[in-house]
Image (spheres, rainbow, N blue to C red):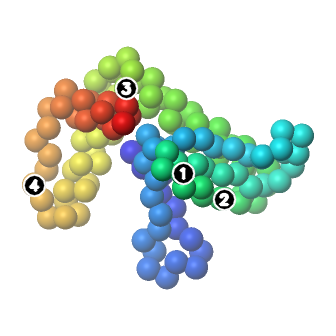
Amino acid sequence: PNLRWTNLNDSLGEGTCVSLLGIHSIRTSLNPDDDENPFFTITTKTGDVHVFESPTISERNHIVHGIKNVVAWLSYHLITGNMATGTVLVSDLDEQRGEAMGELPSLKTPVQAMNELSHDFLS
């Protein structure tokens, strides 16, 4: 699963993509005493820092908590090995990616899909 966004000035509309399993941290402020700005950052495992601005502090908090909750939910199901939850995400993404590239649908079993997700999570 990926987090994808586009820049306002991006004429091609391709945007930027970060793997949810590749997020290292999400911060709303560098100074714990100053949390009154609408900016937040996402730092990836590779060290890339992406800065975002939201219209209000309330929306910023909503977005940050939402991303953290999705990553926590995904991590929980990977760790507990809940096959029914994780494989739905993987099979849908593989199917979409394959259709976009003109390939046949994925023939992965749920166990193979969960193993692939687990390995991505641990690397």
Left or right: where does residue 91 sit relative to residue 102?
A: right
Tally of numbered tags: 4
Q: Earlier in the sequence, mark 1 or mark 2?
A: 1
Q: Earlier in the sequence, mark 1 or mark 4?
A: 1
Q: Say which residue label 1 marks.
A: 47
> Tag 3's secondary structure?
helix
> Tag 1's secondary structure?
loop
Q: Which mark is residue 110?
A: none
Q: Residues within 10 Å of mark 1 (few under 14, many from 20)?
A: few
- The amino acid at mark 4 is Leu
> Tag 4's secondary structure?
loop
Choose mark 1 or mark 3, whichever is in front.
1
Residue lying furthest top: 80
- The amino acid at mark 2 is Phe
Choose mark 1 or mark 2, whichever is in front.
1
Q: Say which residue label 2 marks.
A: 52
Please give the name of the residue rendered at 42% of the width and 71% of the height, measured from the top-left corner.
Answer: 14
Left or right: where does residue 85 sit relative to residue 53?
A: left
Q: Say which residue label 3 marks.
A: 78
- Image quadrant containing the N terminus: top left
**Cα distance in 3D space between marks 3 and 2:** 28 Å
Q: Say which residue label 4 marks.
A: 104
Q: Residues within 10 Å of mark 3 (few under 14, many from 20)?
A: many
Percent across and percent down for residue 89 are 33, 39
Q: Earlier in the sequence, mark 1 or mark 3?
A: 1
